Image (tube, rainbow, N blue to C red):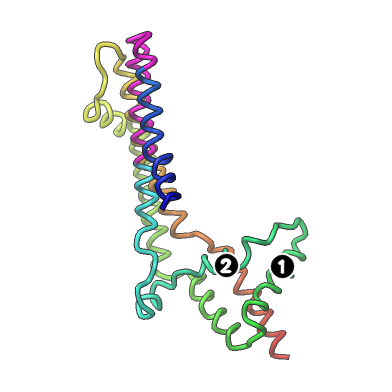
Amino acid sequence: MMKKTFRFFYRIILPFIVAILIVALIYLFHINIGMYIMIAVINLLAMYYLSLFILRLFSIGKEPKSLYSWLDSLDNGEKLLMELFSSEKDNRCVVLNLERAYSKIMGLTGHNLNKLRLLKAYYKIKSEEDAVDVTFKAILGIFITILGWGISRGIIWTYASSNLSTYDAYVSKTYAVGWNFAFIIWVILVFFAAWIRDYFNGKRRIKLIVEILDVCIKNNER
């Protein structure tokens, strides 16, 4: 409980308190500079909190509630690999790394051929690219194209200057609009980064695990 409370404090409360103190101190000494700093801090705080929200959003609903739902979601494959390999330090020798991965998998399954085959079936399905993957890549390509077009044509800049105006007499319009523009681009980039990372996380690793499992199975069949 204490750990969760401390994490909430330094991730949510502390950045807000520090930002208020910085703005207040600068504003007391120089009102003009204080207004510039205030706009910058407000946008940076908004970027920070929205980033936390987006990253949290992509982690919601990952745990399956029943075996029936798990058979479709196939969750916890990455968690298993993390528990299996995260304690092992990386070695510069590729062959040695592969041998250690082989040994860990054999130890996990107890050299049981049925368990090895079941694991291979699971990770093979996880690694295959299906219609959903193709659709995802197509949608991602379209969004990136639209984003590039919006930036090059000045559409996002126009939106930032007309709909998100936060400037006043102490701050130039270009400065305020620049921060609004940066805020919009940042939110879009964080969203896409979280989306891509969430979707393609561990694809290459899982494909290699399938190949290692193949070797394990063949050695056990002898």
Where in the figure is residue 58, as x and y percent of width and height?
Answer: 38, 55
Residue tagged 1: 98
Is residue 222 rendered to the left or right of residue 6?
A: right
Q: Is residue 116 above or below residue 176?
A: below
In terms of sequence position, does the residue under pointer 1 or pointer 2 come before the other?
2
Q: Is residue 136 above or below residue 192?
A: below
Q: Nearer the viewer, residue 107 or 24?
A: 24
Q: Is residue 17 magenta?
A: no
- Quadrant of the image occupied by residue 158: top left
Of the residues shown, which amino acid type is indicated by label 1? Answer: Leu
Is residue 220 rendered to the left or right of residue 171?
A: right
Q: Nearer the viewer, mark 1 or mark 2?
A: 2
Q: Which residues are magenta?
A: 25-49
Callout 1: few (<14), some (14-19), or many (20+) C-alpha neighbours within 10 Å? some
Where in the figure is residue 181, as x and y percent of width and height?
Answer: 34, 30
- What residue lies at 67% left-to-right and 72% top-to-bottom? 104
> How far apart are the two marked residues, 1 and 2, measured between alpha carbons?
14 Å
Of the residues shown, which amino acid type is indicated by label 2? Answer: Leu
Where in the figure is residue 31, as x and y percent of width and height?
Answer: 32, 10
- What residue lies at 76% left-to-right and 56% top-to-bottom? 92
- What residue lies at 59% left-to-right and 64% top-to-bottom? 205
Q: Is residue 46 magenta?
A: yes
Residue tagged 2: 81
Screen quadrant of the C terminus? bottom right
Callout 2: few (<14), some (14-19), or many (20+) C-alpha neighbours within 10 Å? some
Q: Nearer the viewer, residue 4 or 136?
A: 4
Q: SS of the residue at dot 2?
A: helix
Q: SS of the residue at dot 1?
A: helix
- Quadrant of the image occupied by residue 199: bottom left
